[in-house]
Image: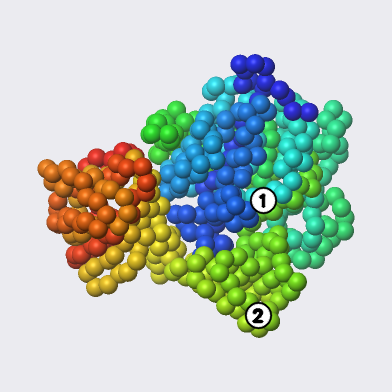
């Protein structure tokens, strides 16, 4: 059973720790480095991070969440939390990527500051659970073992001989904690023959990467098995700063931590590892083939999304984010179309999308990191057309928001308001411009664009000059702490 907090107390509630630092590159071209899969509505109407947070939003069994993310996605994550009605969570920023163990250490240290007896439920932000009620019941079953010092991992009852997951071999049941067993072994991703043996054996389960443990027990085991990670985490948390709604871990200290997963750092070494098998409709959405597997399909086995026309095709996944996408005579294909890239892949080789991503990285292609629509804390901009020494963008500014006070060394700008009213700062002037009015910003002039109204402001921006990169921005003042 779940613990229930006493009135006015948070001491017996579970603290969700949501890890949201991954890039999701195997789901390119929809998932990008600066706007990864957890920020997308891939398996429902809400985004994956919203679905994850809302599983633990009852306020009775769960304390406010700690969400660990990074610099690039911080504003998008914060906006999605706000849109989901989660106003009291803590947003922790990793200065650099260091895998799961350092991230969890930082969250555990922060949770223990306010509650030395804190129990943490650690979950990735990009998993699908179709039966959340059953999962929460299992969290309640595992709670006693976690409070007693066990490091409980939620293992998944396998449905097929999967080679893409690590496995857990279940050990003896824990006498004092019905439903929970010791972990006999963690097993690396197997080949096909071993995976089929595991499935036939019945004592092997998929490793989900979800955990329940007390902060104190976890930190004690980290100190024993990975002291360098704990040392760096303590220094990073001690040197943290608060920036708007974000907790920034101290960069130098966090960077000094080994980059290591929590399995390698602790779970494969501790004698306190326990597991509880789950059959909750869990999926690690790590590739397009997995999205095809869980999606609704037509009578020919096709899963389609968006503006798609499909004829004489079977067992395909076809998704369009705007472009009319037509498929004829295909079998076992994945086709994903965005406004700037199209992926076509054999459904059995979608793990190899990473080869395309690696090539884009070597060639320094913009399509690796960003969509044409790039999100900012004030709204977003979208590239419309790029030519020789000019670029056209559409800017959408949320009501009450404003861009930084800035200047450019290499470009001038011309703004045309197409919807709403803009408050413009240009040099020493400040004035309003309305729909169908425009303003010119000469090269090197201090300027700012604001939306003082109640509706979104839409502006067409024409840039002209010798260099049009986003790094030609000198911020003098910024509401979002970027100057």
**Residue 227 seen anywhere in this rendered image of the structure:** no
Report the quarter where the C terminus lies: top left
In the depicted structure, whether residue 173 falls above or below residue 343: above
Image coordinates of residue 47 in percent, x first then y, are 57, 50
Residue 336: % across, % down: 56, 69
In the rendered image, residue 458, in percent from the top left (x then y), is placed at 33, 54
User: Which residue is drawn at the image coordinates 22% and 69% (left, top)?
Assistant: 389
Q: Is residue 345 above or below residue 6?
A: below
Q: Nearer the viewer, residue 197 or 381?
A: 381
* Secondary element at tag 2: strand
Q: Residue farthest to the left?
A: 428
Residue at 62% in and 43% down: 52
- Residue 379 relative to residue 408: left or right: right
| Apparent side of residue 305 relative to residue 454 in the rendered image (left or right) | right
Per the rendering, the mark at residue 311 is 2
Q: Image check: 347 left or right of 459? A: right
- Which is closer to the viewer, label 2 or label 1? 2
Q: Quadrant of residue 408?
A: bottom left
Where the N terminus falls, by quadrant?
top right
Left-right relation of 11 to 76: right
Secondary structure of residue under mark 1: strand
């Amino acid at each position: 059973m779940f613990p229930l907090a006493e009135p006015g107390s948070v001491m017996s509630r579970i603290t969700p720790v949501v890890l949201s630092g991954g890039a999701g590159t195997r789901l390119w071209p929809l998932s990008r480095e600066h706007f990864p899969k957890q920020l997308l509505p891939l398996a429902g109407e809400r985004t994956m991070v919203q679905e994850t947070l809302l599983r633990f939003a009852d306020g009775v069994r769960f304390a406010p969440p700690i969400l660990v993310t990074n610099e690039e996605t911080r504003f998008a994550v914060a906006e999605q939390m706000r849109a989901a009605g989660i106003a009291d969570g803590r947003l922790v920023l990793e200065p650099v990527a260091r895998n799961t163990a350092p991230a969890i250490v930082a969250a555990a240290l922060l949770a223990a500051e306010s509650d030395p007896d804190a129990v943490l439920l650690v979950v990735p932000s990009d998993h699908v659970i179709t039966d959340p009620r059953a999962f929460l019941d299992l969290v309640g079953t595992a709670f006693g073992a976690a409070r007693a010092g066990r490091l409980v991992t939620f293992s998944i009852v396998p449905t097929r001989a999967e080679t893409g997951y690590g496995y857990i071999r279940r050990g003896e049941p824990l006498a004092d904690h019905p439903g929970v067993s010791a972990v006999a072994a963690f097993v690396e991703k197997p080949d096909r023959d071993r995976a089929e043996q595991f499935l036939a054996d019945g004592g092997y389960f998929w490793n989900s990467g979800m955990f329940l443990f007390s902060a104190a027990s976890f930190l004690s085991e980290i100190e024993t098995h990975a002291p360098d990670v704990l040392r760096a985490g303590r220094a990073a948390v001690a040197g943290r700063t608060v920036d708007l709604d974000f907790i920034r871990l101290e960069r130098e200290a966090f960077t000094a931590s080994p980059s290591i997963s929590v399995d390698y750092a602790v779970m494969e070494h501790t004698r306190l590892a326990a597991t509880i098998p789950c059959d909750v409709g869990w999926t690690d959405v790590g590739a397009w083939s997995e999205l095809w597997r869980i999606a609704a399909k037509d009578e020919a086995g096709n899963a389609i999304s968006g503006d798609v026309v499909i004829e004489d095709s079977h067992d395909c996944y076809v998704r369009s984010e705007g472009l009319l996408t037509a498929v004829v005579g295909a079998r076992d294909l994945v086709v994903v179309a965005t406004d700037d890239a199209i992926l076509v892949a054999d459904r059995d080789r979608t793990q190899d999308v990473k080869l395309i991503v690696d090539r884009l990285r070597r060639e320094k292609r913009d399509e690796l990191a960003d969509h044409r629509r790039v999100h900012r804390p004030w709204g977003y901009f979208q590239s419309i057309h790029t030519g020789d020494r000019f670029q056209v963008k559409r800017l959408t500014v949320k009501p009450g928001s404003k861009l930084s006070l800035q200047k450019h060394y290499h470009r001038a700008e011309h703004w045309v308001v197409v919807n709403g009213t803009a408050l413009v700062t240009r040099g020493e002037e400040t004035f309003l411009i309305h729909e169908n009015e425009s303003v010119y910003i000469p090269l090197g002039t201090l300027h700012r664009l604001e939306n003082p109204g109640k509706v979104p402001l839409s502006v067409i921006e024409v840039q002209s000059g010798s260099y049009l990169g986003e790094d030609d921005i000198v911020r003098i003042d910024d509401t979002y702490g970027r100057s």
